[in-house]
Image (cartoon, rainbow, N blue to C red):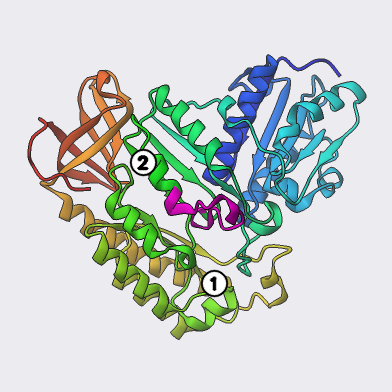
Amino acid sequence: MKEAKTFFMRTYGCQMNENDTEVMVGMLEKRGLKRTDDESGADLLLFNTCSIRDLAERKVMGKLGKLGKLRQNRPIIGITGCMANAKKETLFKKVPHIDFVLGTNNIHELNSVLDEVLLTGKQQARVDMRFEHELDYLQASRPDKVKAYVSIIRGCSKYCTYCVVPYTRGPEVSRTPESILEECQALADQGYKEITLLGQNVNSYGKDKPEWNTLFHDLLYKVDSIKGIERVRFMTSHPVDITLNLMQAIRDLKSLCEFVHFPIQAGSDRILHKMHRLYTKQQYLEKVQMLRELVPGVQLGTDIIVGFPTETDAEFQETYDVLEQLEYSVAFLFAYSPRKGTPAMRWMDDIPEAVKDERLQRLIALQNEIYKKQRQDMLGQVVEVLVEGVVDSETNSLKGRTRCWKNVVFQGPETLVGTLQNVRIHSFNHQTMAGDLVPKSTLQILS
């Protein structure tokens, strides 16, 4: 095979995949390859894939099928990410024209696998089930120059019965606090203003390494001390590991945003037990109440699955009631779809698709009403916005987010990108707030 000079990369799935992509892009650019947006002209095509939902897999397989029809100037094709771990070498049988499969725990081998493909012309697979080789995150190529992802823990050890993550990313493996802080400091030195600490379950951080004596809340205090970082976020969380110490850190640390992704998944204790979520609804609600008492104004996000096997109408209603009661500011709502290799595959997917869809649409309608009420409540408020970029240079339209994830657009000079500004909200369109710049003052800033 000819040496690759250009590469095209597409990312599917979560922020962890996006961060992995940034690392792999950095590796390839350091090798001398040039990234291109021209898929048809690239020498190397990389697809960083997701297995969390059936739709994500079908999108990738459809794309790969089309590439198999190419007959001339065929590029090198590589599959990375969760599908690589979930399907392993069977991908070669389903899509025989791909050249290599690289698992989520083998990203460090990207260049060596590419060398083998170029040298031998033979298909290569590297798929380990445990993350054991630390990545050089400092070489990550980040397109965003204001905010950045920082991986702190890989894998998951909770084994929810519906979830493929423990089988595609392996058990939890924490990254050393020294390497995390080194990366955060480097980002601050480069002018980054916001970092998001990433993991399948960030608040399990350090539990696999008790000798470090550094749990998640300890790490947050260390990151908060880095000058130049204005905002710190984290995702995603498991309610079991949201502790009083973490809540107090959110209350006390200036950089830590007052937003917690607090996924309940279902409102029925029987369904939660069947999901292996490790908490009851009452335990969940008690933690939410404690957090809201400790951190007034804190906002919550959630994930909810409807139509889990054997879910009754009454149990769905319990989920509906929780959504209505807690009024999340962010909600990711899904209908259950079975994933091969998960324990839930043992159970019949017995909820008709029409029933799943009806339940899902009811939740979506409710959440949209909650969003509308929250947006109306923000009218007239002054909020702190981190300016993330330009929407339209001709109209001097800028965009950014509040500390609690609200999208805001307003007019101002491009020189404000990367700064914190006060904006008075005057209207909204769907989930985007619109406002006007106001001078820095003693006005109470809300998020």
* Region in magenta: 202-218
Residue 331 location in percent, x, y? 39, 59
Left/right placement of residue 3 relative to residue 38 reads right
Left/right placement of residue 241 relative to residue 67 reads left
Residue at label 1?
277
Q: Residue at x 74, y 46 (%)?
A: 84
* Element type where label 2 sits in the image: helix
Q: Residue at x 46, y 82 (%)?
A: 315
Left/right placement of residue 74 relative to residue 230 reads right
Decide: marks 1, 2 in contact (CB < 8 A)?
Answer: no
Q: Residue at x 80, y 15 (%)?
A: 3
Q: Quadrant of residue 54?
A: bottom right
Q: Residue at x 34, y 59 (%)?
A: 247
Residue 142 location in percent, x, y? 51, 27
Callout 1 amino acid: Arg
Residue 258 in view in this figure? yes
